[in-house]
Amino acid sequence: MKNYILILFLFTTTFSFAQKKDCKIDFEEKTDSTYIKKTVEVLIHERVFGNSKEMVFFSLLNSEGVPMLGLQQIQKSTEFISALCFDKNSKIIFQLENGKFVTLINSSQENCSSLSYDAETKSNIKVLTNYFLFLKDNYEELKKSPIALMRISYVGEKKDIALKNKMNSELLNITSTPSTYFMDYLHCIE
């Protein structure tokens, strides 16, 4: 009976840690007065349609004990790309596979995408980077269930993105698991 309990304990412990990915830290600074830790960006969404390309990356940040989600959206097209902006009312809403909803709120007042031009490919490139705050009442839910759908609320528009269980990037030639991002990486900033 003792061996059975020991084996069960080891199996349960191994299974619970098997879901978490290794932490890849992009930046960490700890002084007497500050503490900041940021994970590397992970590709969450990619869309290639004709001459238009779009990628969405997530990273996690812990600033003085406050966890945040970093979102970076990159759009590239030979056509005109309209600006995307966040304001104080912007948010990200996740619908989890268990049916629950988790909302993250914008951490800044206003932020819009920056525009650059790639003369070689004759493409417009827009980059939007922003941070969103977790709410205490739903933070734990992100560790328990994969994400089914993500809604990003910009100024004047919303975008829904279904997150895949496994994604093979056509542009970056990498594989990621967007639906379990928080289950895999939230432990890295706690």
Image (spheres, helix red, strand yellow):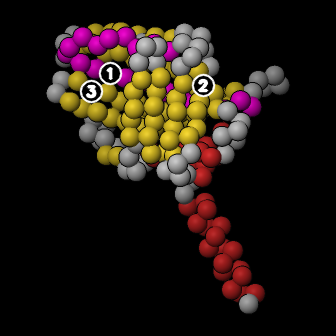
Numbered badge on residue 75: 1
Q: Position of residue 2 (x, y in %)?
A: 75, 87
Numbered badge on residue 105: 2
Q: Position of residue 119 (x, y in %)?
A: 22, 10
Instruction: Tell me the magenta residue range.
Output: 65-86
What residue sits 42% from the left and 38% below the top?
A: 44
Taking the view exactly as shown, the residue that stands out farthest to the front is 99
What residue sits 18% from the left and 23% below the top?
A: 51
SS at circle 2: strand
Q: Quadrant of the C terminus?
A: top right
Question: Would you say the magenta stretch is mainly helix, strand or loop?
Answer: strand
How far apart, in angstroms, are the residues tagged by discs 3 and 2?
26 Å
According to the image, label 3 marks what residue? 53
Numbered badge on residue 11: none
Q: Amino acid at mark 1?
A: Gln
SS at circle 1: strand
